[in-house]
Image: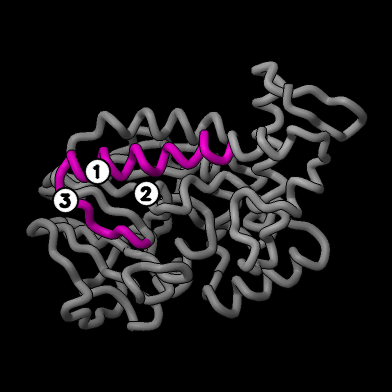
Amino acid sequence: MSLTADWGDAQRHLTERVSVLVGDDNGKYPSGNSLVIGGDGEAVIIDPSVTVVARGGAPMSVDAVINSHSHEDHMPGNGFFSEARVHIHDDDLPGARSLDGLMDVYGLNGEIRDEFSKQIVDEFNFTPRPDAEGFSDGHVWDLGRVQVEAVHLPGHTRGHSGFRISGGVFFLSDIDLTGFGPYYGDAWSDLDDFERSLTQIRDEEAEFYVTFHHKGVIEGRQAFIKLLDDFEAVIPLRHEAMLTFLAEPHSIEEMVTNRFVYRPHVQHMFADSVEHRSAVMHVQRMLVRDEAVEVAPGRFQAI
């Protein structure tokens, strides 16, 4: 159980039992849009954001926290709701159970690992939950006249999951349908898995699709499919941009410097790591497709 807080207009009711707790600036990072689901037996919160912590809780007492995956912005409330159970996909359990486990998800090392670890604790209220419980694809939480079903959608992380909720609500988490496009730049990310997940959710039928960031609530399948098409199209656009760059031989490090994921002005401590991981996956794809060759050790050129 937990303390409750008044959310006023920032609580958007989708159904009688499902609400979105809209994060600051419409869920823009570092905040996000959390879901609360109240059943006759229990209530849960999905991905309690920094805004949930700052406001002092949810608009109802919650019995359990469900994390869509182990990233810092999706778990700020794990420690705040200290008496609630924590659930996360089996594949992402290490990131919820310890700070070192979370750092392994990102794949950060050395000084950047230490710096980001401190930021996650100070700014995202990260609290290890060694008691976190795993779930797998298809797991159902029956809360009493409302159910939440886990849908494993890996790629962003190994355990990244969406949730199918009674009443026509589907929570997409970090398949956030923004112009930035899919993020697959961590050690536990995978481009092929992400594309398979995008294909999988195309068949989801819902009245409301909810993203953790930016878009928030998307009403109706037609609007959802249009946003999904645009989001998915970013992957081949990045790929073609990299192929064009490789018209002349270049190394992965030179691709990192050129920037294909982030804009040049963006300064994140882990930007280079994300660019490196993303470039490696796209180059591997090029080699498999016979679109590029390794012309010298560590240097690649488009064919």
Among numbered discs 2 and 3, the one appearing first in the sequence: 2
**Magenta residues, start to end:** 214-239
Q: Which mark is residue 219?
A: 3
Nearer to us in this view, 133 or 194? 194
Apparent side of residue 259 relative to residue 83 in the rendered image (left or right): right
Among numbered discs 2 and 1, the one appearing first in the sequence: 2
The amino acid on which the numbered mark 2 sits, given as a three-letter code, is Leu
Say if mark 2 contacts mark 3, CB within 8 Å. Answer: no
Q: Which residue is rendered at x = 52% and y = 73% of the image?
A: 124
Q: Which residue is rendered at x = 13% and y = 58% of the image?
A: 14
Disc 3 packing (10 Å; few <14; some 14–19; many ≥20): some
The amino acid on which the numbered mark 1 sits, given as a three-letter code, is Phe
The amino acid on which the numbered mark 3 sits, given as a three-letter code, is Glu
Say if mark 2 contacts mark 1, CB within 8 Å. Answer: yes
Q: Quadrant of residue 197 in the image?
A: top left
Nearer to us in this view, 128 or 255? 255
Q: Quadrant of the C terminus?
A: top right
Q: Main secondary structure of the magenta part?
A: helix
Say what secondary structure mark 1 lies in: helix
Nearer to us in this view, 52 or 266? 266
Apparent side of residue 270 relative to residue 91 in the rendered image (left or right): right
Apparent side of residue 146 relative to residue 249 in the rendered image (left or right): left
Residue 149 x %, y %: 28, 40
Residue at which label 1 appears: 224
Residue 145 drawn in magenta: no
Q: Quadrant of the N terminus?
A: bottom left
Question: In the rendered image, is residue 125 in sight?
Answer: yes
Residue at which label 2 appears: 177
Label 2 and label 3: CA atoms lie apart by 13 Å
Label 1 and label 3: CA atoms lie apart by 7 Å
**Figure check: 237 above or below 295:** below
